[in-house]
Structures are given as C-alpha cells and as structure tokens.
C-alpha cells in the first residue's frame, strides 16, 4: 500500500516537471511557428482553432488577383430638381385637337378660359400650310395631314415629351368647354397608380369602325373629353404601331378606344371610377344666349366637368363667367361656414388666444422681431404722400401704383363702414398707416372722419385692413453658375490716379492672387490737351502697374488692359474741386458711363459678363460670386447698393476699420450711387440700340459731345430721365429685370478719404460747396448722431467759457 502511494506521488512530480519543460521550450507566438514551418501554416490554423479556441484571423491571398475593378464606378448624376428625383408630377395636361381656321376663335377662347386653371395646355393642328403669326403660342403642328392619324400623332407627342411630368391627360376637341376647377377636384381623388380611361360613352352617331363590327358606343367620346392616366399613355406608346395599322375608321372615338383596349385590356370607357364620376353635359337644341336660364337650373349642367358642343367663342366666355360665379359663391359659403366654426370652437371655455383663433382667419400673425433692427415699422401716409419715407426723406410722393392702392383700400373701407352704419357719411382721412410683413402681407390702420346724420355730429372711426399674401409663385429663372468670367471696367479721370492705384493693389490681392476668373480693363479719360505718350503721360504710372501685373501673373491667365478716350474740349475743362463732394466718380457727368462702356465693349465681346466698377470702391471675393449669380443673360442686370464709409481718420468720430461689419457709426448705404452695375454685353447693346434716337451710341471719341449735349431729349418710356446705365434698363423699352440690393461687401469712400488725408486742418474741405439740386448725391462725412454729439459738446464748452 505504501509502495503504491509512493508511485502515485512520483508520477505526479514527474508530470509537473515534464509540463514545465515542454512549456518553457514551446513557441510563444503563432507567428514564430509559421516562420519556422511555413509549409504547415494551413494545418496549424486548424490545430490552433481547435485546441486554443482563439479567434480566426483571415489572411487575403492577393497573388494573381486584379488590384483594379474591371468596371469603373459610374458617377451618379442627380437631377437638378427634387421633384424630378422623387417622381413628383403635375396633375393635369390638356390637349386640344383644333384646325387652322379655328385658332383665332374657338382655340383662343379655350385658352383664355382654361389654360390658367390647368398645369399645361397644347393645341394640335395640321402644319401643311400654317401661318407663323398666330397670337396663340402653345400650338403644335403635324406635317402628316391624314385626319384619322391626328389622335395618334398627339398621343405620341404626349408620350415623348410629357409622360413623366403629369398624372392625367385630357384629350378633347375645340368645341368643348372645360370646367377646369371641377375636373381638377375630381381627379384629386383618383389613384394615380391605376389605369384610367374615363369619359362619356359615344352615342353611336359615329357609325361603325370600318369593318362593320361595332360602333363607338363602348368608347369614350372625344367631343366630351377623354381622361387618360399616364400609365395608359405609356402602354399606348409601346403599342402605337399596332394602333396606327388598325385605325381603319375616320371616327376618332373608335380609333382611340381600340388602341386603349388593345394596349391596356380595358374593355370599355369608364364613366365612373373609384366612386368619382367625371360627367359631361351635351347641348342638344339649346341656344346658350337664349336658353341659358333654363340650362342653369339643371343639376347635370351645374355638376358637369365638360360642356359640348360649343360653337361660338362668346359662348365659351359666357359659360366660363357662369361657372366662375358658381365656384366663387360656393367657396364663399364654405369660407363663412369655416369662419363660424372657428370662432365658435372654444364655446366660451377657452380664450381665442390660446386656440390661436385671431382675425383674419388663416392669416399668420407677424413674427416677433429678434432685435430692434428687425422691427417692421409703420409708415404714415395720406392719399398722395408718405411721411418719413426713409431716414433721409421726410415727405415722398406716392407712386402711381401706391396711390391707386390706398385709394382702393379707402373706398373699400368706406363701403364697409356705410354698410354697417347707414347713418354715417365719410368726410376725410384723419390718419393712415401701413406696414408690409413678408409673412403676413400688407396691413393698414385707418382713422377716418365721419359725419353722423342721426346724432348730427362728427365722429372718428378706426379700421384695420389687411391684404394677405395669397398665391405664392416661384419665379422661373435661368440657370447660372459661379464660374463665369467677369470683365471689370474701371473708368479713371486724371484726378483719380491715386484711387486707381489703390484699386489695382487691392485687385491683385483679392482677384489675381486667388486666381479668380476675372479680367480688368482700365478706361483712361484724357483731357483735350493732356499728353498721352512718353513720360508726360498722366496715366503712365497706372500703365506700368498694369503691365507689371500682367507679366507677373500671365501664367494664371490674369490680365490687365486699358483703353484711352480723348474727351472733347467742352467737357475737359479744369476739374472743379466741388466734384469731390459727389459720391459718383463721374461727378455731374453721369452719362460718361455710357461713353466708357460703348468704347470698351469693342475689345471685350458681346458674350461677356461685364461689371462697371468705381475706382473708389473695394470688395471681397464673395461679392463677385453674387455678381455672377445675380446677373443673368437676357433676364436680369444687377446694381448693388454699396456702403459709403465715413472718413474716420479725418473726423475722429469713428474708428477706421475696412474689414469691420457695416454699422450706422461707420457709414451708410448710398442709394443714389449707381456707379457699380453688372450686365451682359449683348443685353446692353440691345438696350442701347432701342434708345439710339434719344441716347446716341458712342462709336468714337468724336461722338462723345453728341451724347452729352442732348439732355432735353433723353427720357425713357415712363418719361423719366436716362442718365445712368441702370436707367437704361429700368426706364427704357428693355424687358430685362433690374435687381437692386444692398451689398455690405462693396465699400465706397476711398476718394474723399484721400482728399481729406492731405487737409488736416480742413481748410480745403471748408471751401467745398454742394449744389442744392445735387444735395442727395453729396457724400456725408459723419452720421447725424455723431454731428449732433459734436454740436452739443462744443455748445457746452462755449457756455462754460462764457460762464468763466
């Protein structure tokens, strides 16, 4: 027994020693094992996974494997608009089959009564001998004059151009009046995923289909209007060849019906679908002008989506007037019911403010201002003038539009007052205020004097009127980018050389060093006797700088050029120091901007984006991007309102800072400065040619005097004078839109600062005089508050000295 125990102890000790020895000499890392025995790697993986339970780390074998994808990854091109990517479509397209002789009568009547109530409308005619001077522009002509194929040409046109843009297509003839409001409301309740072939069944008067098989009683009548969904149009396009080969009849109802039946397996016309009945009304023996009172009593007529046949344009207008009145009365009734329900919703248990029930219903309340700068002010006015129009003008004459607007509001208010109290009689306006809120609309507060005939005394009544914003439209605008090259024109007179040198220095840092896509052209105005060659050239420093910049950065494509203009003796007399007061670089000769552009465009081209700039201006790179985005060829010109900086170094009333944000203490937005304007060359040339008789084009230096001397005849279409490039587009016959907006990153004031820098005592400045008629165009050197503070401070000092 003792021997046995000794053996077991021996075995235990021997096992411990052997385990220690084996663990000491075994590899500590699997990588060491792989290095010693690479041929056993695969077997070792299996052993380690089974014995040690460790996580398996896969190793990729990339030998003889391609490192590049066989097919390159295609870039995803997203559409421009969200609704295209999301598949959002408009509701209704109307296609009308008409004839050339009916374009000016029936087709025009349909267009005037229906086009503004549907999303799109087109008229389809034969184009064998079509006049090109139709006033109706939405016409499509087919060269194939076979009458039985006209519907299929129309269907092919719709499928190729508008299939993915509209849910439903209404096909009809030019003798069908469409009650568009009723039809649209009915189609809103139909599912767009189902195939729809709806209308009024034919009456069998069209005869058979040519094979003697059947008449048109199971097909929709084209004269009553046929509604097809986009899914049906898509299936018809796939089977259009079969439809054309099998259109043996001259009856459009049968041809369209057979094509729909073959393509969609819809056996017959659907007069009702998903509980919606698109009804039509047939005028049998009625004369609308004579029997309209009888027709209007029929429920079928009042609920019809289409009325046919209508053979006179006057009948279209009569039907449209009637159905418009019916819809207006119906909407007014619904509106009154909703208003009553809304006003009674609280049942006197909750305040209307808690329920957000306020007058007028449906109009949002004004947004609370975040700061005092966001408060929308009320403007005092009367029937002819507005008071405190802005910070610079106390009394301003109302424009013709505003004057008519206040007159209409006043008349409507007087009618409402006399309706509520017949005993009062309007006498005069006590006070009136208006305010425009971009969220709410135009608000008016009127205090009117009335004479109370019953009480025999004057009484004052107050009214609140609102013109809410109703239909909001997105104005279509052409597509523009920020990569367009901008040609900057910089007019320079002989006394503005220092300002132009500073402009070139800033231009190099802002545009040329950043490789902005710009081109600068200097325009030098020489006097009649000023030398322009050799060392005596007054603009020689600027020309040397331009050559140096072009040579320095020519590899980047940046270039500075110049053009020289010789002024006539009549306008090149000695410079008047009083012109320093003008905010414009042209002084009183505003038409010199036309001279600069007319002669410079010959070296730029007619497809360029041009910005006429001021040598007293400075800007940041993002300003040029706004010029590119806001200047649209054939559509819009841009005239920014720059910020005029006060000469803080000279006055000491403010801190000079070129990169600080705009503020009342550092300057003001100069509304009367039109020096900076951007446009496309061809738009400018077209506008100039339209007014060439009153504003002669300058083709050479000899034409300058002819332009400047005809001030009496230079007036636009509205009778206003044309003295700047902005007036050319705003007051001329051009259809180009003018955008005028404040631009904080466009700064003026360099000219007056340079002039005052050499006048520390103000002796030269004291001699300057601003002409009264040009007072609003004169530069201000400080704000009213700053001048007032100086005046009060000096007054106190003067009083203290007198007291002493």
Image: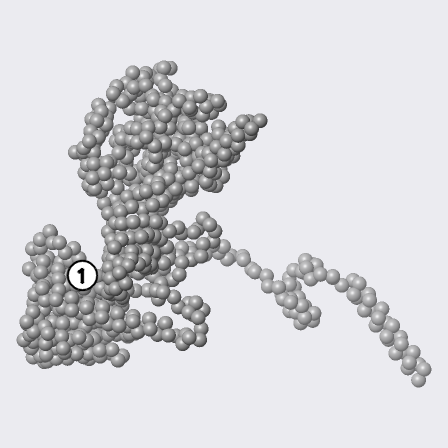
In x, y percent, where is residue 769?
36, 25
Q: Tell me what residue is drawn at x 48 percent, y 30 percent.
A: 651
Q: Residue furthest front?
A: 456
In x, y percent, where is residue 248?
9, 72
Query: Is residue 269 placed above or below 446 in the rendered structure?
Result: below
Residue 489 position by quadrant: top left
| Residue bearing mark 1 | 122
Q: Taking 434 as reference, is 53 left or right? A: right
- Mark 1 burial class by Cα count in 10 Å: few <14, some 14-19, many 20+: some
Which sits in the foreground, 431 or 321? 431
Which sits in the foreground, 96 or 405? 405
Residue 77 shows in this picture: yes
Q: Taking 698 as reference, is 555 left or right? A: right
Query: Is residue 800 placed above or below 466 in the rendered structure?
Result: above
Q: Tell me what residue is drawn at x 25 percent, y 38 percent.
A: 728
Is the image coloured rainbow, by chain, by secondary structure, or in one colour?
Answer: one colour
Q: Tell me what residue is drawn at x 16 percent, y 33 percent.
A: 693
Which sits in the foreground, 95 or 619? 619
Q: Taking 14 as reference, is 539 left or right? A: left
Which sits in the foreground, 172 or 751? 751
Residue 244 position by quadrant: bottom left
In x, y percent, where is residue 39?
64, 62
The secondary element bearing badge 1 is classed as strand
Residue 275 position by quadrant: bottom left
Q: Tell me what residue is drawn at x 50 percent, y 34 percent.
A: 792
Q: Residue furthest right?
A: 2
């Amino acid at each position: 027994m003792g021997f046995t125990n000794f053996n077991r102890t021996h075995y235990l000790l021997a096992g411990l020693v052997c385990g220690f020895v084996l663990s000491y000499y075994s590899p500590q890392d699997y990588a060491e094992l792989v290095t010693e025995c690479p041929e056993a790697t695969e077997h070792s993986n299996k052993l380690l996974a089974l014995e040690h339970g460790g996580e398996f780390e896969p190793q990729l074998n990339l030998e003889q494997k391609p490192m590049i994808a066989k097919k390159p990854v295609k870039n995803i091109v997203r559409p421009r608009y969200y609704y295209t990517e999301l598949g959002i479509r408009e509701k209704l397209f109307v296609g009308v089959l008409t004839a050339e002789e009916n374009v000016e009568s029936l087709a025009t009547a349909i267009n005037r009564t229906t086009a503004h109530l549907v999303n799109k409308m087109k008229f389809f005619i034969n184009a064998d001998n079509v006049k090109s001077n139709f006033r109706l522009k939405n016409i499509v002509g087919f060269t194939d004059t076979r009458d039985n194929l006209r519907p299929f040409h129309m269907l092919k046109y719709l499928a190729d151009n508008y299939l993915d843009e509209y849910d439903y297509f209404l096909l009809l003839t030019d003798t069908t009046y469409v009650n568009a409001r009723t039809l649209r409301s009915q189609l809103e309740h139909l599912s767009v995923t189902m195939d729809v072939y709806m209308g009024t069944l034919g009456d069998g008067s069209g005869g058979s289909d040519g094979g003697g098989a059947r008449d048109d009683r199971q097909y929709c009548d084209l004269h009553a209007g046929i509604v097809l969904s986009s899914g049906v149009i898509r299936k018809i396009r796939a089977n259009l060849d079969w439809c054309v080969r099998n259109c043996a009849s001259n009856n459009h109802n049968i041809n369209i019906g057979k094509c729909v039946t073959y393509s969609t397996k819809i056996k017959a016309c659907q007069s009702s679908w998903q509980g919606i009945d698109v009804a039509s009304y047939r005028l049998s023996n009625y004369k609308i002008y004579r029997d309209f009172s009888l027709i209007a009593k029929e429920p079928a007529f009042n609920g019809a989506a289409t009325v046919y046949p209508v053979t006179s344009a006057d009948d279209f207008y009569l039907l449209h007037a009637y159905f418009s009145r019916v819809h207006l009365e119906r909407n007014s009734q619904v509106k009154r019911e909703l208003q009553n329900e809304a006003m009674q919703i609280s049942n006197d248990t909750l305040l209307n403010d808690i329920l957000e029930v306020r007058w007028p219903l449906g109009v949002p309340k004004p947004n609370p201002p975040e700061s005092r700068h966001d408060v929308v002010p009320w403007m005092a006015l009367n029937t002819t003038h507005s008071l405190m129009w802005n910070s610079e003008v106390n009394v301003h004459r109302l424009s013709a539009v505003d004057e008519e607007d206040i007159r209409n509001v006043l008349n409507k208010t007087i009618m409402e007052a006399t309706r509520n109290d017949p005993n009062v009689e309007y006498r005069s306006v006590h006070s009136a205020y208006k305010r425009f809120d971009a969220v709410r609309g135009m608000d008016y507060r009127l205090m009117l004097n009335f004479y109370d005939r019953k009480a025999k005394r004057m009484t004052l009544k107050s009214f609140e009127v609102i013109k809410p914003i109703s239909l909001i439209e997105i104005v279509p605008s052409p597509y523009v980018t920020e990569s367009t090259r901008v040609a900057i024109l910089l007019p320079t007179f002989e006394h503005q050389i220092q300002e132009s040198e500073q402009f070139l220095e800033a231009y190099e840092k802002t545009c040329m060093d950043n490789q902005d896509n710009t081109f600068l052209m200097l325009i030098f105005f020489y006097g009649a006797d000023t030398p322009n060659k050799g060392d005596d050239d007054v603009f020689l420093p600027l020309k040397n700088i331009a050559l140096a910049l072009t040579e320095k950065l020519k590899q980047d494509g940046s270039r500075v050029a110049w053009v020289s203009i010789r002024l006539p003796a009549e306008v090149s007399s000695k410079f008047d120091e009083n012109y320093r007061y003008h905010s414009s670089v042209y002084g009183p000769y505003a038409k010199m901007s036309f001279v600069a552009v007319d002669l410079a465009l010959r070296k730029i081209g007619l497809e360029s984006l041009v910005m006429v700039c001021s040598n007293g201006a400075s800007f940041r790179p993002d300003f040029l991007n706004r010029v590119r985005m806001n200047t649209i060829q054939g559509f819009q010109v841009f005239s920014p309102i720059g910020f005029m900086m006060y000469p803080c170094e000279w006055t000491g009333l403010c801190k000079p800072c070129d990169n600080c944000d705009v503020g009342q203490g550092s300057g003001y937005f100069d509304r009367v400065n039109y020096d900076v304007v951007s446009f496309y060359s061809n738009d400018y040339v077209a506008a100039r040619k339209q007014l060439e008789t009153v504003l002669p084009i300058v083709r050479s230096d000899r034409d300058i005097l002819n332009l400047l001397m005809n001030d009496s005849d230079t007036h636009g279409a509205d009778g206003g004078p044309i003295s700047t490039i902005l007036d050319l587009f705003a007051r001329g016959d051009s259809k180009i839109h003018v955008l005028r907006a404040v631009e904080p990153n466009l700064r003026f004031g360099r000219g007056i600062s340079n002039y005052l820098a050499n006048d520390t005592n103000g002796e030269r400045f004291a001699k300057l005089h601003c002409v009264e008629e040009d007072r609003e165009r004169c530069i201000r050197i400080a704000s009213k508050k700053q001048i007032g503070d100086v005046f009060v401070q000096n007054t106190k000092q003067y009083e203290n000295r007198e007291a002493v």
